[in-house]
Amino acid sequence: MTDTIQNFSDTFMQQPVGALQPFRSAALENLKQYGIPGNKHEEWKYTRINALFQQPLALGTTSALTKADLQSYRLPDAENAIELFFINGIFQIGLSYVGDEITVMPLETAHTSSFAHIVETHLGHSSKYHPDGINALNGAFVHNGVFMHVAAGKQVEQPVYIYYINDSRTEATLALPRTLLFVGANASIQVAEQHITIGNETSFSNQVTEVIVERDALVNFYIIQHDGSNANQVCTTHFRQIGKAVTNATTISLSGGLIRNNLNMVMEAEHGEAHMFGLYLLDGKTQVDNHTIVDNAMPHCFSNELYKGIMDGESTGVFNGKIFVRKDAQKTNAYQSNKNILLSDNASANTKPQLEILADDVKCSHGCTIGKLDEEAMFYLRARGIGEKTAQALLLHAFAIDILDNIKIPALRAYVDQLISKRLDFNF
Amino acid sequence: MLKIEHLKAAIEDKQILKGINLEIKPGEVHAIMGPNGSGKSTLASVLAGRDYYEVTGGSVSFEGKNLLEMSPEERAREGVFLAFQYPVEIPGVSTTNFIKTAVNEIRKHRGIEPLDAVGFLKMMKEKMKVVNIDQSLLSRSMNEGFSGGEKKRNEIFQMAMLEPKLAILDETDSGLDIDALRIVANGVNTYRNAGNAFLIVTHYQRLLDYIVPDFVHVLYNGRIVKSGTKELAKELEEKGYDFIRNEFAETEEA
């Protein structure tokens, strides 16, 4: 283990975290056992995460950022949203607006509340899918995470906006935000998270979000990543359907340093449905690595994944999609598609579908493409008087649009479209 | 308006156009006919600026300017329009937005104010009638899922919207039923005037029953081997292309 982590261990294990202590200790043991993965680790081949630990990182330090400082980072129509702020991985109840539609409390508190059994049962479920030091690192030092509970039957009208802010103005920071969301039977909720780094020092956010979904519930989840080149993150979002439910996740990655997204859909009940959409629109030296897992344990589940990448400059896009169909999961329908466009000779795309199918009556398909812009389409546009740059922007925007269409919060969709259009220099 | 002199073009060392000479004046309709592989579509593509072909000799001037030096978009802005033989499907780009963007790029080049939404819709409604194209088609993605006939009508609709000086129709008649053929021809005839010109590339004479050309040229083996009036098209239809092949076989290896 590196010195950095040893230092965390010395200081942070002293924190009073009450009932979470056994969970932390177990994770710390895992961290010691696995270590931080190097690039020989198959799952981390393209993402050299260990390089980030070669420098001193300050973990979970307090920040002087005020509500006024954060005003400009709020998502559109935030006045009509539930807003949760994390700074350097620490949930800030004082900056947040919780409202009365859902229950929100620090994880430590939840563990001794009437929700204790939920925390006990589900916290850390993602570690089964990520037996590595990165997931363990988050668990080992979990502190001031957040627990959210949506009561059975509740249709949450306001979207939940979660802001993960790193204050890297004075020192290199490490944040370990932890979120556990429980969505009760027949409830529905929309969640959007945005990652923001303030300051120019190195920022590394290693975040774990676990979402537990009961029968007949619906969750729409959006992850928006457009941060500075000093902002690195591992974003693990783990859905566990414990009843027949619908979970949709859309990940939009527009900028940043090194970004690794782990998105899991664990389907433990019959007739579950999951949709996973991703758009990565990269330039500079940004690297985005999308790892997805769909685990079909029961029959009659449906999952669909569509990830699209546009890489310019020296950027790299990685897609690794795993689909497990377990022995009992007959009649599974699982589809996966990854499409990439390379705009420069120095950009690269790596794509790898991995299907492990143990049932014999299933429909699974996967496909991937890596190419350039369609020359026929380019010529067609130009032959109508549309300049090369505009034609390219039009085609790239068209390529991205079907991912964007999955954002069901109109103000958020417009906001993301605006970000994309600005990047593409697209204005129609 | 258009002056082609000794134009030669090749694709990967294979010479396709071997010296084309053709002059088109405002108000004229020229038809280029010829058997498959004679170079008809190559000529249309070279004029529109497709870089798939390499121009290996000769010159093309359009209203006194060197056309071959222009990018495809510059040619379009100057007033050259190509109706594609195989119009491209572009998912995610609405037909209306596409055409509006094109119209305004061309207006900008001509120093005219861009059309606002209202002005554009008004213009669109007028031109839609001419080619009998439905509003629902235009709100869909460009050519996506259009039938062959709908794609060709969309080409003529774009032509009407962009108001080119020279329109090149590359086998616009191929694969059309008689009703669609009439609609396409009607679009061209409505738009035809003393100030613009047409170059109609076709394999068959039947389109020329509806769009009567002033001149007919036979392209064979990369050269224009015969020129005449609309009677020439009738002769070709009756005799077939074999008589051209027999008459000009000796030039093939030259």
Image: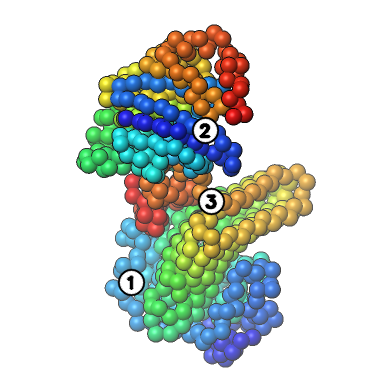
Label 2–label 3 contact, CB within 8 A = no
Q: Residue furthest top?
A: B238
Q: CA distance from mark 3 to mark 1?
A: 39 Å
Left or right of residue A323, residue B96 in this image: left
Depth check, front residue: A50 or B12: B12
| Residue of label 3 | A372
- Residue at x 45% of width, y 50% of height: A396
Q: Position of residue A241 (x, y in %)?
A: 60, 56
Check disc 2 and report its element: helix, strand or loop: strand
Check disc 1 and report its element: helix, strand or loop: helix
Check disc 3 and report its element: helix, strand or loop: loop
| Residue of label 1 | A70
- Residue at x 37% of width, y 70% of height: A96
Q: Nearer the viewer, mark 2 or mark 3?
A: 2
Q: Residues within 10 Å of mark 3 (few under 14, many from 20)?
A: few
Q: Quadrant of residue A264?
A: bottom right
Q: Chain of mark 1?
A: A
Disc 3 marks a residue whose amino acid type is Lys
- Residue at x 53% of width, y 85% of height: A55
Label 2–label 1 contact, CB within 8 A = no
Quadrant into which the N terminus of chain A falls? bottom right
Disc 1 marks a residue whose amino acid type is Leu
